[in-house]
Image (cartoon, helix red, strand yellow):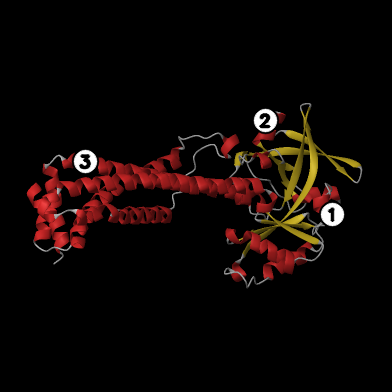
């Protein structure tokens, strides 16, 4: 029979009959608050980083492959042998990576052409990104605030265009409006009348003020390119942490000398540096919360030890080992921690569900790229946070419980 467990079970309930019960309640509330804050903070940080990365990668992919001269020219330069490059990338084994043949998720074509939009005596310079019907529209569609995606035709190119909300407001136009787009190709002025099909908003100013979405066939017709001629390829990979390694392999081993590859992390480094700063904030905030929780539970445990000084002296006189006595108080602490964590999980996860559904906590989109505090309802995240939080707090009980060994049995019995 486990004597320390037996004594803990028999003596813990007696606290309900003493003034110590109020202190225990305060400890449970403290643990509940810390658990709630840790769960919400972890959920917000993960949701924040995930949504920002979805916006960045969903709109542009992970790696761009273009002609090596395109970075030194504002003119549209076709990627030579784009179909062959696409096949080579898809067929490459990536044996040096754990993901191997599953490294590449998808490759999509795109065409970029600068243009000037004119309407209502307003003009706006943009990069028109031409995409095909085969492109993954899921990422773009979820950013649509109004209207719908481009309508494609097998016989001719579509005259639909999708603008950002920022540009649409500046030009004072709405879906269904006609727009004159001016192109300058080989010193020739070309005009096309397009119709605003949809309005998107990513919250990333770098994208919203720069890009418009159109049918790739339209841009190929303006540039007088053949069907297989495109500006570049967007590569989507399976494992995000490997993006720089995959980009290095593609450039060194797969692509011809005329092609150039660049990861989105390199193209927009400030976004990812900003996200890295959020990691520092996350660990700092969570560390402070856990530290406060450790101080609280350690203080409570010392109070419980002092209130049970006569019992410690009696148990020592009867020959009970110090470690077994410490385990009694550690079990007290575990009871308090579990009680607080259960309450904290109910409150914390409940608030996460409410924020995810109603989005009542708003943010300044210009500063945070999001208009609300994002939430990640990842059960694995909640489980891992609970396990780590519980282990850290329980381990911290070892230090205050050491005070048991410093109590003199003779004085403790006399104290009674």
Tally the numbered discs. 3
Residue displayed at 44% across by 48% down: 42
Q: Quadrant of residue 145?
A: top right
Q: Residue 130: x, y in percent?
A: 74, 49
- Location of residue 132 with respect to 94 vertically, above or below: above
Residue 27 visible in the picture: yes
Q: CA distance from mark 1 to mark 2?
A: 33 Å
Residue 343 visible in the picture: no
Tell us which disc is closer to us: 1 or 2. Answer: 2
In this view, the residue in front, 95 or 231, is: 95
- The crowding category of the residue bearing disc 1, from other C-alpha atoms within 10 Å (few below 14, some 14 to 19, many at least 20), is few
Tell us which disc is closer to us: 2 or 3. Answer: 3
Label 3: which secondary element: helix
Per the image, the residue denoted by label 1 is 225
- Location of residue 105 with respect to 180 vertically, above or below: below
Check residue 169 in the rendering and tell me which mark sits there, or answer none.
Answer: 2
Q: Residue 124: x, y in percent?
A: 76, 34
Residue displayed at 63% across by 54% down: 136
Tell me which label, 2 or 3, sits earlier in the chain.
3
In this view, the residue in front, 377 or 49, is: 49
Tell me which label, 3 or 1, sits earlier in the chain.
3
Q: Quadrant of the N terminus?
A: bottom left
Tell us which disc is closer to us: 3 or 1. Answer: 3
Q: Residue 24: x, y in percent?
A: 21, 43
Q: Residue 200: x, y in percent?
A: 63, 40
- The crowding category of the residue bearing disc 3, from other C-alpha atoms within 10 Å (few below 14, some 14 to 19, many at least 20), is some
Residue displayed at 68% across by 40% down: 197
In this view, the residue in front, 172 or 52, is: 52
Label 1: which secondary element: loop
- Location of residue 259 with respect to 119 vertically, above or below: below
Residue displayed at 15% across by 54% down: 408
Per the image, the residue denoted by label 3 is 23
């Amino acid at each position: 029979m486990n004597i320390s467990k037996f004594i803990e079970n028999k003596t813990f309930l007696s606290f309900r009959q003493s003034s110590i019960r109020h202190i225990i309640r305060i400890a449970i509330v403290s643990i509940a608050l810390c658990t709630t804050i840790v769960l919400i903070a972890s959920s917000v940080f993960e949701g924040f980083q995930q949504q920002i990365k979805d916006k960045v990668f969903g709109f542009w992919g992970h790696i761009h492959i273009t002609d090596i001269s395109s970075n030194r020219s504002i003119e549209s330069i076709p990627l030579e042998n784009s179909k062959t490059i696409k096949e080579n990338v898809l067929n490459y084994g990536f044996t040096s990576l754990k993901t191997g043949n599953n490294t590449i998720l998808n490759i999509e074509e795109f065409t970029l052409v600068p243009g000037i939009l004119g309407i209502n005596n307003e003009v706006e310079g943009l990069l028109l990104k031409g995409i095909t019907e085969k492109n993954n529209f899921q990422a773009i569609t979820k950013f649509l605030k109004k209207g719908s995606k481009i309508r494609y035709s097998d016989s001719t190119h579509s005259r639909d265009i999708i603008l950002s909300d920022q540009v649409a407001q500046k030009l004072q136009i709405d879906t269904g409006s006609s727009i004159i787009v001016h192109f300058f190709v080989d010193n020739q002025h070309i005009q096309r009348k397009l119709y605003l099909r949809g309005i998107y908003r990513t919250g990333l100013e770098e994208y919203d003020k720069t890009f418009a979405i159109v049918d790739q066939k339209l841009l190929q017709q303006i540039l007088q390119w053949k069907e297989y001629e495109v500006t570049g390829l967007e590569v989507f990979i399976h494992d995000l942490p490997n993006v720089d390694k995959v980009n290095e392999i593609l450039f060194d081993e797969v692509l011809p000398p005329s092609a150039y590859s660049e990861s989105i992390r390199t193209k927009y480094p400030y976004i990812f540096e900003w996200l890295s700063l959020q990691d520092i904030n996350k660990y700092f905030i969570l560390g402070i919360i856990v530290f406060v929780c450790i101080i609280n539970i350690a203080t409570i445990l010392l109070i419980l030890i002092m209130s049970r000084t006569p019992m410690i002296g009696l148990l020592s006189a009867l020959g009970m080992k110090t470690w077994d006595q410490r385990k009694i108080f550690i079990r007290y602490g575990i009871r308090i921690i579990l009680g607080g964590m259960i309450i904290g999980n109910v409150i914390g996860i409940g608030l996460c569900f409410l924020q995810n559904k109603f989005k009542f906590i708003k943010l300044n989109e210009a500063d945070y790229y999001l208009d609300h505090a994002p939430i990640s309802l990842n059960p694995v995240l909640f489980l891992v946070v609970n396990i780590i939080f519980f282990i850290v707090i329980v381990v911290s009980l070892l230090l205050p419980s050491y005070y048991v060994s410093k109590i003199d049995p003779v004085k403790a019995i006399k104290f009674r």
